[in-house]
Amino acid sequence: MLTRKAVAEDIPRLGGTLGSAFAEDPIVNWIFPGAGTRTRVLPAFFSLQIRHLYLPHNEVYTTENLVAAALWLPPGQIAPGFASIMRLAIRLAPFLPRAGRALPRIPRLLSTLDANHPKEPHYYLAVLGTEPAEQGKGYGKALLEPLLERCDREAMPAYLESSSPRNLSLYERHGFNVIKELKIGKNGPSMWPMWREPR
């Protein structure tokens, strides 16, 4: 299965790909409970993240048919925090008729992730997603393996946060181990930070 680095022309399509990939994600559903809101917001939000936070580091990967994408940050780059994500979220205001209900949950999520993000150098897999109709066909594996091979060559760890328990086994097969379970908010969903030592 062929994979390649994404380019600027891919952004609209990949925003849609990741929007549909995460439409039923537990964290996304907690932030945006309405299906209609998710349909409006997610493609634009992922497109903004790709353009402003990940593509400048040249570590966005996709498949030839653009049905899957992985957004990485290399060692030495700080994971997008509260300020950068909120700047992007504000740009989505026209898409959010009920923004008052959704946006207060984003700072809660970000503060939890920031507090638990490792300080030592590592490759950070921020997002990995495949369109629902294409899931289970090996796209996630195809996007993971080249970067993890680089981690091994460079003797560099990798880190991610899984927002769905069903994805844990995929990451565990590629050498990631769960560090802990993070509860987001008082009644929110869980996330699982995962760490991979180089092989």
Image: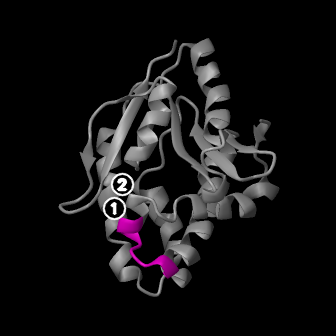
- Point 47% across, 25% down: residue: 121
Q: Is residue 96 magenta?
A: no
Q: Give the residue pinned by disc 1.
A: 107
**Mark 1 crowdedness (10 Å alpha carbons): few <14, some 14-19, many ≥20:** some
Image position, residue 47 (x, y; %): 65, 62
Amino acid type at mark 1: Pro
Specify start and end residues of the magenta stretch as a single range. 29-36
Q: Secondary structure at mark 2?
A: helix
Magenta segment, prevailing SS (helix, strand or loop): helix
Residue drawn at point x = 40 percent, y = 25 percent: 120
Distance from disc 2 to disc 1, alpha carbons, whole Å, reads 5 Å
Say whether residue 30 is magenta: yes
**Circle 2 residue:** 110
Occupied quadrant, residue 25: bottom left
The x and y percentages for residue 93 are 51, 80
What residue appears at the point 62 percent right and 47 percent down from the top-left corner? 54
64 relative position to 160: left or right: right
Q: Camera-side residue: 121 or 37?
A: 37
Say whether residue 88 is left or right of residue 144: left
Label 1 near label 2: C-beta < 8 Å? yes
**Element type at mark 1:** helix
